[in-house]
Amino acid sequence: MAKRYIFHIDANSAYLSWEAVYRLQHGDPLDLRTVPSVVGGDPTTRHGIVLTKSIPAKKFKIQTGETLYSACQKCPGLIIVPPHYSLYRQCSDAMVEIFREYSPSVQRFSVDECFLDFSGMELLSDDPIKTAHEIKDRVKNELGFTVNIGISTNKLLAKMAGELKKPDLVHTIFPEEVPAKMWPLPIEELFMVGRATSKKLRSRNINTIGELANYDLKIIKLFLKSQGVLVWNYANGVDYSPVRTVGTIEVKGMGNSTTIPFDVEDRINAHLVLLSLVESVSNRLRQAKVLARLVSVSFRTNEFYGCSHQRKLYNATDCTDEIWQIACELFDELWKGHPLRHMGLRVSELCQNDFYQTSLFGKNYEKRRKIDSAVDTIREKYGSSAIFRSAFLNSGLHSMTGGVVENEDYPMMTNLL
């Protein structure tokens, strides 16, 4: 049987690199990658989170996800640039196009990283490591930014290899290299070991990946349950997941959330925020040709207390007004009048839209669905702001929040291996 070769390809400091390349190409003399800089939200609208940072910024211990206020305290001269998600998607697409020249099996793991199955590509190249260097150099020379490439026989080890040292490098962790290259690493470096899991492991004196790999699995299962089996297998380099090409991943749900520029203290504005979220989520449902059977809303108060509420629908739908009505009812049942700073909406239990069943006892939304279709056509041709509801005039709120505009919090496509 031919040996399996999996590449994990990850753009280095993706958002910041893409921003830097774009600015250099348009005459900016400063390369953001060479100075302490971050891509983050707008602190004046409270989207003040570090999305990505330059390598010089790491020297100030700036962390992804921390507030811009905290980052500026660590580095007073920090350069902050706002995110431009449409640009980042273009850069991501250009990167993937290069990858597809080397294999038909490319899985987008997130907006800035992919898996590539190079198995059986001997006619193209009999040296996968040489090919990985060629891909890395092409991205650098043709697109202007750098990537790290990890190589192994499965996705888990390829991903772990790509994280060993950055930037602009190729690493391997083949199964025989696991004890030397992976086991000495701190337990937190293992994929799928988060803060809670690492705390439980360290409390039992399991501090490295190797110590987990050689621990009794029966004991691991006692305090980590099924998660323990997963991370124990990962620690031993065991992973059988395939590289899923585009179109083979089942989408189980869609959702958006937003941090609001001001504290929402009344029901009218809260309902408007929900409408802006529903506008983009329902548009994505219709684009994907699916209907939703479950609607859930969530919010976070200005004191960071969070809660959520959901409802199963009698009939699946993609209608903006119908989903909005349900979201507002859920919100009204949940909200106790506390000022809100963050709201979210999610739809799930999706099904195909080739058969749409109307309700005998509820409202008939068929006319509204036709309006939705017309609005989608206009927005697709002229942009998301070409047509919007008058309720958003002078409201201080975007008519569409998340997903298709540039103010969503984390526009990632990350999922499990």
Image (cartoon, rainbow, N blue to C red):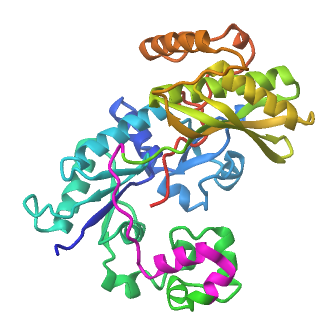
Q: Quadrant of residue 177?
A: bottom left
Residue located 60% across and 73% down the image: 226
In the figure, 281 relative to 183: above or below? above
Q: Nearer the viewer, residue 175 or 120?
A: 120
Residue located 38% across and 72% down the image: 157
In the rendered image, is residue 220 in sight?
A: yes
* Residue 375 left/right relative to 101: right
Residue 401 locus on image (x, y percent): 62, 28
Q: Quadrant of the C terminus?
A: bottom left
Residue 179 in magenta stretch: no
Q: Quadrant of residue 391?
A: top right
* Residue 29 left/right relative to 323: left
Residue 235 in magenta stretch: yes
* Residue 31 left/right relative to 186: left
Residue 118 locus on image (x, y percent): 22, 61
In the rendered image, is residue 399 in sight?
A: no
Q: Which residues are magenta?
A: 219-247
Residue located 62% across and 68% down the image: 194
Residue located 59% across and 77% down the image: 228
Residue 143 locus on image (x, y percent): 28, 42
Q: Quadrant of residue 268?
A: top right
Q: Quadrant of the N terminus?
A: bottom left
Residue 165 locus on image (x, y percent): 40, 69
* Residue 123 left/right relative to 189: left
Please count the marks in the image.
Answer: 0
Q: Residue furthest front?
A: 360
In the figure, 39 relative to 380: above or below? below
Q: Nearer the viewer, residue 301 or 268?
A: 268
